[in-house]
Image (cartoon, grey):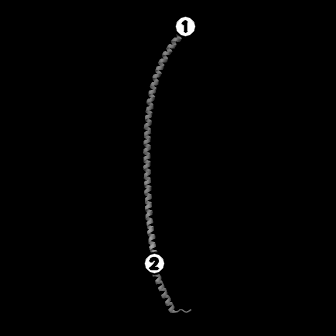
Amino acid sequence: MNIQPSVLIWTVICFCVFMLVLWKLLFKPLLAVMDARREKVDSARERKRGSDERIAKAKEEKALALAEAKARAAAAYAAKAEKLRADSESELKALAAEYEREKETARGEYTGEAEATQKTVAAEVGALAGEFAEQLLNFR
């Protein structure tokens, strides 16, 4: 096998021309497309990061709003419970006072009736004792 210098030179020239054609027609456009794609991917990643940050911020705001709403609800519940407790206590005091008044009224009525009954019984016992004594005297 013999190396011929003219074939070697023509092979190198053809190879260089072929590489130049490939560079102009294939590699350069392919690199441009790949660079554009990389820029799009980077841009999409940046948008995703931005939307992730917005989502995280929205979640934080939602959590804060929920916490505030829970705090307001708890405060309203406590206020309502306190109002109901105070109303119940005042109603209970009013009922206790009414019960005491009714008890005193009933005690007064029963005391008066008891005294009247005692007087009536004492008078009737006296009359019955007199009748009994008369019947004993008349019994003979």
Give me the disc on residue 138.
1
Q: Are marks 1 and 2 in contact (CB under 8 Å)?
A: no
- The structure residue drawn at horizontal position 44% and vertical position 32%, both measured from the top left corner, is 98
Residue 84 higher or lower than 126, as above or below: below
The percent coordinates of residue 22 (x first, y second) are 47, 82
- The structure residue drawn at horizontal position 45% and vertical position 33%, both measured from the top left corner, is 96
Disc 1 element: helix
Left or right of 107: which side holds 136? right
Residue 87 higher or lower than 16, as above or below: above
Give the residue type that dot 1 points to. Asn
| Residue at the extreme top of the image, as rendered | 140
- Dot 1, how many residues are within 10 Å of its Cα: few (below 14), some (14-19), or many (20+)? few
Q: Calculate the distance from the C-alpha at mark 1 to the C-alpha at mark 2.
A: 155 Å
The percent coordinates of residue 88 (x first, y second) are 44, 39
- The structure residue drawn at horizontal position 52% and vertical position 13%, both measured from the top left corner, is 129
The percent coordinates of residue 95 (x first, y second) are 44, 34
Q: Nearer the N terminus, badge 1 or badge 2?
A: 2
Give the residue type that dot 2 points to. Pro
Task: Pick whichever, 3 or 35, lies toward us.
Answer: 35
Give the foreground label among 1 and 2: 2
Disc 2 element: helix
Residue 41 higher or lower than 17, as above or below: above
Residue 135: quarter of image = top right
Residue 6 higher or lower than 49, as above or below: below
Residue that carries the numbered disc 2 in the rendered image: 29
Residue 46: quarter of image = bottom left
The percent coordinates of residue 33 (x first, y second) are 45, 75
| Residue at the extreme front of the image, as rendered | 25
- Dot 2, how many residues are within 10 Å of its Cα: few (below 14), some (14-19), or many (20+)? few
Position of the C terminus by quadrant: top right
Position of the N terminus by quadrant: bottom right
